Amino acid sequence: MELGRGEVTVVRVHVKEMKPNEWAGSCGDVQILVKGAGETSEAGVVAGSFDLWMLSLAFAVAESIRAYVTEKAWNLESLHVDAVDERSGEGKLLYITFLIHADGLHQGERDELFGAVRNRCTLLRLINKEIEIYFSDQLAKG
């Protein structure tokens, strides 16, 4: 697809409003239903664009972790990533903390990994610099 700059899009997403506060989104063969903030959610329905964004961030961090571990040939047995947001009283997003459980990696490997992911993960680099990003090593907490 030409964008007038001689570039070709690699990823194209499509969002269509199905009814007020309900959208169908697609990216390639993947389709999801997104409901507006405050709407009730059903199985398979993401309740709002912010939830979808947080889910995307957690996936992006997990993919970056897996890619880095594979590159280093480390023994990652299992991986869990949770993203938790903290907001001001006015609802402004202040912090995102990624709670990471990376079984099979030693403490030094996990420390190196978190620094590398912070710099390599494309979606993390796009976040406004006013929003602080933290990584919490869940294995170090015992």
Image (cartoon, rainbow, N blue to C red):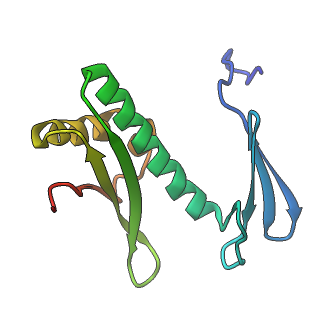
Q: Quadrant of residue 137?
A: bottom left
Residue at screen point 68% across, 14% down: 6
- Asked if residue 64 lies left or right of residue 111, the reply is right
Q: Please count the marks in the image.
A: 0
Where does the image place residue 86, in percent across and percent down from the top left?
A: 37, 72
Residue at screen point 29% across, 52% down: 101
Which residue lies most toward the right here? 19
- Asked if residue 95 lies left or right of residue 34, the reply is left
Position of the N terminus by quadrant: top right
Q: Quadrant of residue 19?
A: bottom right
Where does the image place residue 39, in percent across and percent down from the top left?
A: 72, 77
- Compared with residue 78, is residue 32 higher up or lower down, i.e. above or below? below
Residue at screen point 53% across, 54% down: 55
Which residue lies most toward the left here? 108
Where does the image place residue 75, in percent across and percent down from the top left?
A: 26, 30
Most foreground residue, 65 or 124: 65
Which residue lies most toward the top here? 6
Most foreground residue, 82 or 50: 82
Where does the image place residue 35, in percent across and percent down from the top left?
A: 73, 67
Position of the C terminus by quadrant: bottom left
Most foreground residue, 95 or 140: 140
- Compared with residue 140, is residue 6 higher up or lower down, i.e. above or below? above
Residue at screen point 71% across, 65% down: 43
